[in-house]
Image: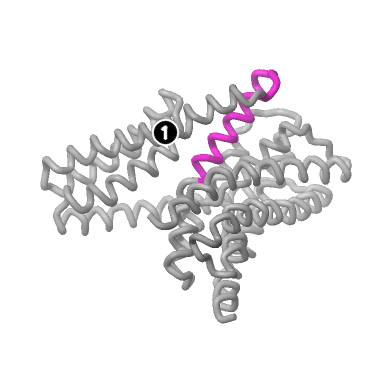
Amino acid sequence: AERKWAITLLATVGVVISTAVVGTLTWYVLGLMGMALPYIYALLFGALISPTDPIAVLALLKRVGVPKNLEVTISGEALFNDGVGVVVFTLIYGVIQSGQDFTLMHSGLLFLQEAVGGAVYGFVLGYIAYMMLREVDAYTVEILVTLSVVTGGYALAEWIHVSGPIAMVVAGLFIGNHGRLLAMSERTREHLDKFWVVVDEVLNALLFLLIGLEVLILRISGSIFVAGLATIVIVLFGRVVAVSGPILLLQKKRGFPPSTIRILTWAGIRGGIAIALALSIPPSPHRNLIVDITYVVVVFSLLVQGLTVETLVRRTLKK
């Protein structure tokens, strides 16, 4: 609870700042390299690459000795910023499809509908599931209830046009805290934990398998690869800017360690969310360029950042 403001600012304002910084610099740098990308498409890339991937980040935190308060900030941000990133991506792509000018009024209303509406819907869904869990004491039924929340709840979220990722996070937090404490027996908690651990591991493996298979069929030229390397620098810079604002703003009240910005920057791993959003862009003259540079950034993030962040954390915390 004491990190709620840091998590909220990083997952909302941080994503918007990163989208603007990464999109603007990508548009400028690619233009210098002779790969003209319309500014609105550059912002679209900024939106899809800004969220950190919760699967990759949470898997990373299992083996990295990050202080508990910093771990809560990193994991909390990762759980919420992908939902906000999807909302920003949807908003920008809606502008592209409609061909209309970007207006703050329309964008604000859409953000409220998707983000706030998703949070309210997720809370209601979590409460309904909690009431159902409280009435039964059979772990098989309770596992099916939580599974139906994820599958049916997400489908309904898309139908009523609210953010599914944000709704699932809020519902999961409600069930995982309030429901777990007051509506589940010890036996149910044990079986439920084992079930979702298996689901998490299987989906995690499938995600990275699909990313690997897609890499095999990509045909990235030398110029695209150089553009991807330049984009890596831009994305990391955007991450520094997005993280620094909220952390420095809350520094005096929350007392973050001096190494917080450095760790949050390097631990901000990109993964399946960015790939999925890039591949969801319908065929257009600019789609292939966005997909290619997205893959370069994600592969770098998973291999380089993922394999070195543990060393960075240990060395930083020793200082």
- Which quadrant is the N terminus positioned in? bottom left
- The secondary structure making up most of the magenta span is helix
Element type at mark 1? helix
Picture quadrant of residue 232 = bottom right
Quadrant of the image occupied by residue 96: top right
Residue 178 rendering spot, x and y as whole percentages = 24, 48
Note whether 30 is above or below 94 in the view shown.
below
The residue range painted magenta reads 81-102
Residue 77, position as x, y percentages in the image: 49, 52
249 or 162: nearer the viewer: 249
Left or right: residue 289 compared with residue 315: right
Q: Amino acid at mark 1?
A: Gly
Residue at image location 60% in from the left, 73% down from the top: 312
Residue that label 1 marks = 118
Please tell me whether residue 92 is drawn above or below residue 52 in the rendered image.
above
Residue extending furthest front? 252
Q: Residue at x 59, y 47 (%)?
A: 14
Q: Residue 224: x percent and y percent?
A: 79, 47
Q: Quadrant of residue 127?
A: top left
Say left or right for 285 vs 5.
Answer: right
The local crowd at label 1, few if under 14, some if 14 to 19, many if 20 or more residues have their Cα within 10 Å, is many
Does residue 308 show up magenta in the picture?
no
Place of residue 249 in the rendered image (x, y in percent of width and height, measured from the top left): 58, 55
| Residue nearest the viewer, comparing 256 with 278 | 256
